[in-house]
Amino acid sequence: MRVKLKATKTSLYKLVSLYAALPGMKKTDFTKYRRTFWLRWYDDYATYEACFTVCAGRPILTIERRKLDGDAPPTRTVYTITVDDLRSRGMTEENLSLSIS
């Protein structure tokens, strides 16, 4: 059985809100390319980007913060998410292969 990630703006917003303070959903941007999903937002001091994808077969969520002023490097925090947690949130798509004899 193969498990694929799926996300909508709402489901990703709810997942990211467990790890970071977010503005209202209308003030965030959602982008998707294949099975990678991004949520971007900003405040008066920094821009933020959350990326939800699979790395080495494990679902991960990275949140990067870039300060608006100065040359400080961005800070990035990586969270591993369990497949069971994603299943309970409806953020997986399971592909069952059926063989016909």
Image (spheres, helix red, strand yellow):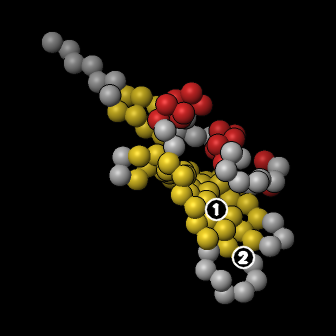
Please tell me in which quadrant of the rendered image residue 47 appears: bottom right
Q: Secondary structure at mark 2?
A: strand
Residue occupying the point 42% across, 28% down: 94
Quarter of the image with the C terminus in it:
top left
Q: Which residue is mark 2?
A: 67
Residue at x-position 73% and y-position 60%? 41
Asked whether 39 or 71 is in front, the reply is 71
Q: Horizontal and vertical percent for residue 72? A: 65, 83
Residue 90 in sight in this render: no
Three-letter amino acid code at the position of disc 2: Lys
Quadrant housing residue 31: bottom right
How many C-alpha atoms fall within 10 Å of the one at disc 2: few (<14), some, or many (≥20)? some
Q: Position of residue 85 (x, y in %)?
A: 54, 33
Q: Where 27 sits versus 85, above or below? A: below
- Up/down of 51 relative to 92, above or below: below
Q: Residue furthest left?
A: 101
Decide if residue 81 is on the left or right side of residue 46.
left
Q: Is residue 50 left or right of residue 99?
A: right
- Label 1: how many Cα within 10 Å (few below 14, some 14–19, many 20+): some
Q: Is residue 100 visible?
A: yes
**Which residue, as the protein is rendered here, is positioned at the far bottom?**
71
Find residue 49 and name its label.
1
Q: Secondary structure at mark 1?
A: strand
Q: Along the polypeptide, which appears first: circle 1 or circle 2? A: 1
Q: Residue at x 71, y 54 (%)?
A: 20
- The kind of residue tagged 1 is Glu
**In the image, what residue occupies the spot 61% across and 71% down?**
75
Residue 14 percent coordinates (x, y): 69, 41
- Identify whether 50 is placed above or below 6: below
Q: CA distance from mark 1 to mark 2?
A: 12 Å
